[in-house]
Amino acid sequence: MKENVKEFLVGKTKELKDAGTCCAELKEVCGEFLAAVGTDNEDEAARKLMAEIEEDIITVDGLIAFANSERGVQVFGGAEKAKEVAAHGEAIKAAGAKYCDCAACAICEEILAKKDEIL
């Protein structure tokens, strides 16, 4: 991977790891990648990171469906907030969004945009 792409990935991975909406599994893989930078395991860790990002990023349709579910109501702290999240999802979908725009998903989308350069 080119040095400028590596710098991008390291910076975005640090941001992702610190994002409040990043799940525990992805945080762990972020940490593994960051620990592997500069070692013989760097490429393997980058592939694992990309696979986890692809698994964890939420599509806008997934966000809407989750917000409209009972689990979404629990996670978002009540029916009213869940309705707000679902409405937000509908609005960003109408504007052309493919993915959820929470901090973690937005960073994942930035990283995925460079997947070919990273892998």
Image (tube, rainbow, N blue to C red):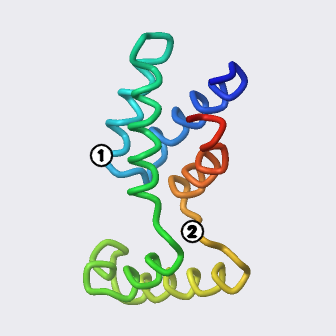
* Residue 70: percent from left, percent from top: 26, 86
* Residue 17: percent from left, percent from top: 45, 38
How far apart in space, not on screen, are marks 1 and 2 (Cα)? 19 Å
Instruction: Classify residue 10 by image quadrant.
Output: top right
* Residue 18: percent from left, percent from top: 47, 39
Question: Which quadrant of the rendered structure holds the C terminus?
Answer: top right
Image vertical order of residue 44 relative to residue 84, above or below: above
Q: Residues within 10 Å of mark 2 (few under 14, many from 20)?
A: many
In front of the other: 67 or 13: 13
In the displayed structure image, the side of residue 54 where residue 24 appears, left or right: left
Please tell me how many numbered marks the rendered image carries: 2
Image vertical order of residue 44 relative to residue 100, above or below: above
In the displayed structure image, the side of residue 7 where residue 22 appears, left or right: left
Of the numbered discs 1 and 2, the one sitting upstream in the chain is 1
Residue at horizontal 46 percent and vertical 66 percent from the top:
58
Q: Which residue is mark 1?
A: 25
Q: Which mark is residue 67?
A: none
In front of the other: 50 or 95: 50
Q: Which mark is residue 99?
A: 2
Question: Which quadrant of the rendered structure holds the N terminus?
Answer: top right
Residue at horizontal 55 percent and vertical 55 percent from the top:
103
Image vertical order of residue 71 relative to residue 3, above or below: below
Q: Residues within 10 Å of mark 1 (few under 14, many from 20)?
A: few
Residue at horizontal 49 percent and vertical 81 percent from the top:
61
Amino acid at circle 2: Tyr
